[in-house]
C-alpha cells in the first residue's frame, strides 16, 4: 500500500487535558508526518477550550518548525471537522468530575461495593450511557463525511464504547489506553530492570488486563520466576493503593494484572479493602454539602500515593474540582516531545504502510483470545500497517480470570441492547449481573435516582 501524500486529522474533544496536548505534540514531532502536508482540524463543544487549544497548536507548530506544512483549523461543528479526515481522534467528556462523583457515590449509597466508578461497576455503566450518544454521533458523522477513516478512541469507558461503535456503526475503530504501559512500568520497578528490557504481552479487558508473558528482550529469559521472588521480598506498604490488590491477585492467579487497584478493583466485589483512598475520594459531608445541586464538586483524590492529606490545616484556597478545560503548555526548555500514547503511532503505520507493533489495542474478539466471549471488546497487542490493525492471537487466560472478564462481556452486551432499545429493564439486567451489586430493590432505586440526577445528559430510557 502506497504512502499517502497528505494526511488530515480530526481531533474531537480537542480541549482534552489528558490527550489533547499529547496528540498534538505527537503529530508535530513525527518525522514521517513532517514529510507531507498535514491538516489538523480541532473540534470541541466548548468555545473557550477550543480557542485555547487552537492558539496552542498554532504556537506549537511554529515552535516545531511545521507552520509551512501544517494547516490548523478549529470548529464547534462535528460534520465540518470530520469531513475528508483520514484519522479521527476522540477524547470527549462533558463535566467529567461533576458526573463522575455521582457515579462514585450514588451506587455506594445503595450498598454496592464499587471503587472508582470510571469503567466498571454501576458507575461505569452510567459513564457509558453518557458518552455512548456523543461517540455514536462521531461515528455516524464519519460514515457520512470520511467513510473508511479510522476512529482512534481515548474516551472511557473504553471497552464498552468500542463494542457499541463496532456493533452499531460501520466505522473501523480501535480503543487506546496507556494502562498497559503503566503495567510495564510496575514490572520494571519490581524487577529492577529498565522498562525497555521488558517484553510483556497484554491480554484481557481494558483496565483489567493481564500479562500472559514477561520476558527479557535481550536474553529471552522468562522473568515471571524472578518477579515472584521480588514481589515476595517487597515491602507490603510501599504504594499500597497502587500495588496491594495487584500483588494479591498475582499471588492468587499467577499473572500480573494492570493498571492498578483503582482500575482493576472496579470489576470485583472485594477490592475496596485494598484501596485505602476510596474513603476520601470525592469526600464531602452530606449533612451540610450539596455538591451536585451547587455544582461545587468535591476534590478528586486518585490515591494515597499522592499524599493528599499532607497539606496545611487552614489552606488559603480550598481545592475545588471542576472541568479545568484545556491548559496550554510548553515544556520548560521550549522543545516539544513525543508522548508514549499509541494513537499517532497507529496513524503513521497505516498512512505510510510502516509495520509497527503496538502493545495494547481494544478491538473486537474475533477468536483472538480463546475462552473469552466472541465479539466482546478485548485488549491485546497488534501489528499495524497500511492495511490496518491486525490483532495478535493470545493464549487462554486462567479459568477464573476468563470468567471474571466474560461476566463483563455479558454486561457490555446487555448495555448495548439497553441503549439501542431505550430499556431500563435491560440496564437492570446488566446491573444485577455486576459482581459489586447486591440487592434487587436497591438496584432499581439506584437506576431511577441516577436518571433523575443525570437527566440532562443520559439517553431516554424507560422501564
Image (spheres, rainbow, N blue to C red):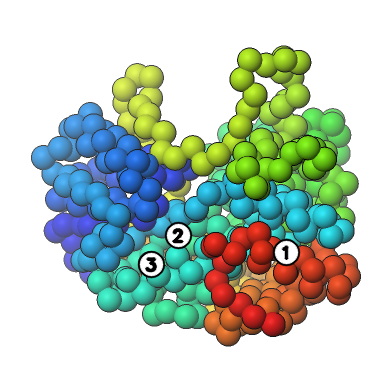
Regarding mark 3 in the picture, which secondary structure is present there? helix
At a point 79% along the width and 30% down the height, the residue shown is 238
Using the image, tell me which numbered label, if any, was put on residue 449.
1
Using the image, tell me which numbered label, if any, was put on residue 153.
2
Q: In this view, does 20 lie to the left or right of 118?
A: left
Regarding mark 2 in the picture, which secondary structure is present there? strand
Where is residue 371? Give x, y as percent: 70, 77
C-alpha distance separating marks 1 and 3: 29 Å
C-alpha distance separating marks 2 and 1: 30 Å
- Above or below residue 429? Residue 268 is above
* Residue 173 sits in quarter: bottom left
Point out the image quarter for the N terminus: bottom left
Q: Assess whether mark 2 and mark 3 are in contact (beta carbons under 8 angstroms).
A: no
Q: Which of marks 3 and 2 is nearer the N terminus?
A: 3
Using the image, tell me which numbered label, if any, was put on residue 199.
none
**Which-is-in-front pick, marks 3 and 2?**
3
The residue singled out by tag 3 in the image is: 138
Point out the image quarter for the C terminus: bottom right
C-alpha distance separating marks 3 and 2: 11 Å
Query: Along the line of sight, which residue is nearer the eye, 318 or 288?
Result: 288
At a point 39% along the width and 44% down the height, the residue shown is 15
At a point 29% along the width and 35% down the height, the residue shown is 56
Regarding mark 1 in the picture, which secondary structure is present there? helix
Residue lying farthest to the left in this orientation: 68
Amino acid at each position: 500500500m502506497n504512502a499517502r501524500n497528505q494526511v488530515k486529522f480530526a481531533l474531537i474533544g480537542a480541549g482534552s487535558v489528558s490527550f489533547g496536548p499529547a496528540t498534538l505534540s505527537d503529530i508535530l514531532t513525527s518525522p514521517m508526518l513532517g514529510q507531507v502536508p498535514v491538516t489538523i482540524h480541532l473540534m470541541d463543544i466548548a468555545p473557550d477550550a477550543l480557542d485555547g487549544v487552537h492558539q496552542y497548536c498554532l504556537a506549537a507548530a511554529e515552535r516545531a518548525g511545521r507552520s509551512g506544512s501544517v494547516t490548523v483549523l478549529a470548529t464547534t461543528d462535528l460534520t465540518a471537522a470530520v469531513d475528508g479526515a483520514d484519522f479521527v481522534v476522540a477524547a470527549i467528556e462533558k463535566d467529567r468530575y461533576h458526573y463522575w462523583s455521582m457515579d462514585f457515590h450514588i451506587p455506594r449509597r445503595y450498598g454496592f461495593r464499587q471503587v472508582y466508578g470510571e469503567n466498571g461497576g454501576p458507575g461505569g455503566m452510567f459513564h457509558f450511557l453518557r458518552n455512548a450518544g456523543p461517540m455514536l454521533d462521531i461515528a455516524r458523522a464519519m460514515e457520512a463525511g470520511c467513510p473508511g477513516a479510522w476512529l482512534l478512541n481515548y474516551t472511557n469507558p473504553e471497552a464498552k464504547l468500542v463494542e457499541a461503535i463496532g456493533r452499531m456503526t460501520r466505522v473501523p475503530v480501535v480503543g487506546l489506553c496507556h494502562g498497559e504501559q503503566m503495567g510495564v512500568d510496575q514490572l520494571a520497578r519490581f524487577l529492577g530492570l529498565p522498562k525497555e528490557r521488558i517484553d510483556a504481552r497484554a491480554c484481557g479487558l481494558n483496565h483489567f488486563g493481564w500479562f500472559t508473558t514477561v520476558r527479557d528482550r535481550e536474553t529471552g529469559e522468562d522473568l515471571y520466576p524472578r518477579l515472584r521472588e521480588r514481589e515476595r521480598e517487597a515491602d507490603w506498604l510501599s504504594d499500597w493503593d497502587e500495588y496491594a490488590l495487584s500483588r494479591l491477585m498475582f499471588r492468587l492467579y499467577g499473572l500480573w494484572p494492570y493498571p492498578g487497584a483503582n482500575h482493576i478493583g472496579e470489576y470485583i466485589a472485594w477490592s475496596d479493602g485494598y484501596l485505602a483512598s476510596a474513603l476520601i475520594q470525592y469526600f464531602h459531608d452530606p449533612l451540610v454539602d450539596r455538591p451536585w445541586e451547587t455544582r461545587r464538586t468535591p476534590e478528586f483524590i486518585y490515591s494515597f500515593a499522592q499524599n493528599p492529606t499532607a497539606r496545611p490545616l487552614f489552606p488559603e484556597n480550598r481545592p475545588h474540582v471542576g472541568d479545568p478545560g484545556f491548559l496550554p503548555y510548553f515544556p520548560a526548555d521550549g522543545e516539544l516531545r513525543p508522548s508514549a500514547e499509541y494513537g499517532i503511532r497507529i496513524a503513521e503505520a497505516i498512512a505510510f504502510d510502516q509495520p509497527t507493533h503496538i502493545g495494547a489495542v481494544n478491538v473486537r474478539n474475533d477468536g483472538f483470545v480463546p475462552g473469552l466471549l466472541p465479539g466482546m471488546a478485548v485488549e491485546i497487542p497488534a501489528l499495524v500497517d497500511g492495511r490496518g490493525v491486525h490483532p495478535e492471537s493470545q493464549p487462554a487466560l486462567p479459568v477464573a480470570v476468563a470468567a471474571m472478564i466474560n461476566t463483563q462481556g455479558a454486561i457490555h452486551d446487555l448495555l448495548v441492547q439497553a441503549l439501542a432499545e431505550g430499556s431500563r429493564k435491560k440496564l437492570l439486567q446488566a446491573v444485577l449481573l455486576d459482581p459489586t451489586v447486591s440487592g434487587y430493590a436497591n438496584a432499581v432505586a439506584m437506576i431511577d435516582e441516577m436518571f433523575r440526577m443525570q437527566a440532562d445528559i443520559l439517553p431516554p430510557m424507560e422501564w
